[in-house]
Image (cartoon, rainbow, N blue to C red):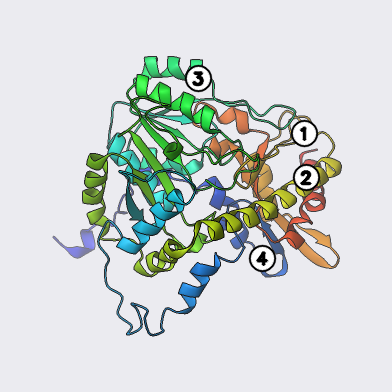
Amino acid sequence: MNPATVVSQRAQLSTHFENRKPSVIRQAQILFNQRADRDRVRCINLAIGNVSLPMHPALQKRMRSLGEAGSPFANGVVMYSPSVGLPETRGAMLHVIKAAGLSTDGLEALITDGGSAAMELMVLGVAGPKSARPLVLVDPIYTNYADMCRRVSVPFVSVPRELRADGCFTRPDLVALDRLCEKEKPVALVVCPSDNPTGQYLNRADLADIARLCVRRNLWLVSDEAYRQLHYTGEPVSSVWALDEATVPGITGRRISIESASKLWNACGLRVGGFVTDSPEFHAKAVAEYTANLCTNVIGQWIFAALADETEESLAAWYAQQRRYYVEMMRGLRDDLQRAVPGIIVSQPLAALYSVIDLVKVVAPSFDAGAFVRYCAEQGRIDLDGQAYTLLVAPMSGFYTATQTAAGRTQLRMAYVEPPKETALVPKLFAALLERYQATLA
């Protein structure tokens, strides 16, 4: 064939890629980075839970000693670890569970590249690609669970929660959940006892009720425990590992917890996560699947492993310090937002580090939270004391499943991750940005 006659064609993207949009927790930052004036505008980013606090001291010490004598990396060699993770890292993950007064008998840990990789592995393990049976999610849900289901073609269904005028979310309706299970025949139920994005706290009694339903319906119980010790009610820590056969007969062998170094240990960029399970079969097959990933970041694993040497007392002191920091910030921001924007609904977190804001009583019926987020990211600019600022938040529509997205039309999620000085500017900044955006709609 004459090369001159060849018609150039564009290589085709997959349908999945064609339809893919950035996660709502990353969307605002991507748009802001495209601004021509980004170097002249200070961005306060509350759209993603990117904690700005220093890591736990033991992790910092390990990080600083990477090249010193006694470090496995002192000679500059960084080899693969076993796919299951370094023994020390797996031990550290189980140690922090045991130090909370929970039994680790029969538990196995697998270390992954952050909690997100553990989520994907979990979906593959309980359902598998093109499964006919869905996962059950509790709306609103952390975005990555729905995204991971879509990535591997696993269906999902959900039970709703609603943000009330008093700033509290309704609890998952067990009767509705049972009816959903009867209708959809799911394979697993995903819960988050210290919940992202709602800040709701499902205590041990709540979790036991859900676990009994899982036993009755023969479901895997998946518990996202990235925020396990970040709860503010004074109750005992809530975890699937606090359940036992006496409380929930038949629970053994169907539990999976998603773990992460990101939030409790202030180590988001370390990208160390994992899951723990009491099912030997699930663990063994998960390790087999993860061999395709070779292993998790070995330097991050070794840094996280420093927690294995921390005493129960020192860990308890760390948790208390973290809780005090967040409680003070949360209360102050909520009160100031309500003064700055009369009629605004702001959830009061009982756990985790997020508030959901609802503007339903403040804005016109045509208001779209996603459009407001784009405005703030692309052109929002407020001058405070000679410095230009904008605010990045996440539209809640991305935290609801496809059948529930209308619920997030007037809602936003804010993460308590910026330093207190910057966080103190948020109410005034939010009110001014909202006023200017509303003026563009007039």
Q: Residue furthest left?
A: 1
C-beta proximity under 8 Å, tags 2 and 1: yes
Which residue carries the number 4 mark? 38
Q: Amino acid at mark 1?
A: Val
Disc 1 and disc 3: Cα gap in Å? 33 Å
Which residue carries the number 3 mark? 174
Disc 4 and disc 2: Cα gap in Å? 20 Å
Q: Earlier in the sequence, mark 2 or mark 3?
A: 3
Which residue carries the number 2 mark? 434
Q: Amino acid at mark 4?
A: Arg
| Mark in the foreground, 2 or 3 | 3
Q: Earlier in the sequence, mark 1 or mark 4?
A: 4
C-beta proximity under 8 Å, tags 2 and 3: no
Query: In the image shown, does 340 or 166 lie closer to the viewer?
Result: 166
Disc 2 and disc 1: Cα gap in Å? 9 Å
Q: Is residue 7 visible?
A: no
User: Which image quadrant: the C terminus?
Assistant: top right
Q: Secondary structure at mark 4?
A: helix
Q: Position of residue 160 (x, y in %)?
A: 55, 25
Q: Amino acid at mark 3?
A: Leu
Q: Position of residue 66 (x, y in %)?
A: 42, 78
